[in-house]
Image (cartoon, grey):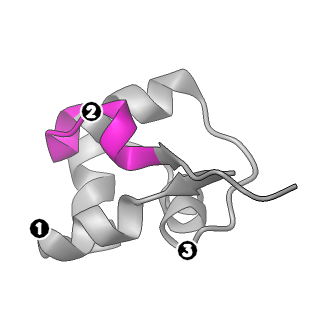
Amino acid sequence: MIENKLSEIMGRKRLKISDVLEGTGLARNTVAELYHGRAKGVQFETLDRLCSYLGVEVGELLVHEKTNR
């Protein structure tokens, strides 16, 4: 399972959704869905903008968690 760490990263940096919107130019719905962990998918351009703005690598933003299946 892929785990989205956007809310944790934003919390550490004390950023609000509105800060990310202003800094990335992304749509509110896109950022809110990612922040709340409800997104079903994400565009590479979105990842690029978020990583650039937050100063993180993709592997810090999205983490693969092994599941027992």
In this rendering, the label closer to the viewer, 2 or 3: 2
Which residue is more in the foreground, 21 or 51?
51
Residue at mark 2? 57
Q: Is residue 53 above or below residue 13?
A: above
Q: Residue at 49% x, 60% y: name it.
A: 28
In-image side of 37 versus 60 (left or right): right
Residue at mark 3? 36
Mark 3–mark 1 Cα distance, whole angstroms, equals 17 Å
Question: Residue 13 bears which disc, if any?
Answer: 1
Q: Residue at 15% x, 72% y: name it.
A: 12
Q: How far across and down, in percent of the image, does residue 58 sit?
A: 37, 33
Graded by Cα atoms within 10 Å as few (under 14), some (14 to 19) or many (20 or more), the crowding at tag 2 reads few
Q: In which quarter of the view is residue 59 placed?
A: top left
Q: How many marks?
A: 3
Q: How far across and down, in percent of the image, does residue 56 sit?
A: 20, 39
Q: Is residue 23 above or below residue 14?
A: above
Q: Magenta segment, which residues?
A: 52-62
What type is the residue that disc 1 sits on?
Answer: Lys
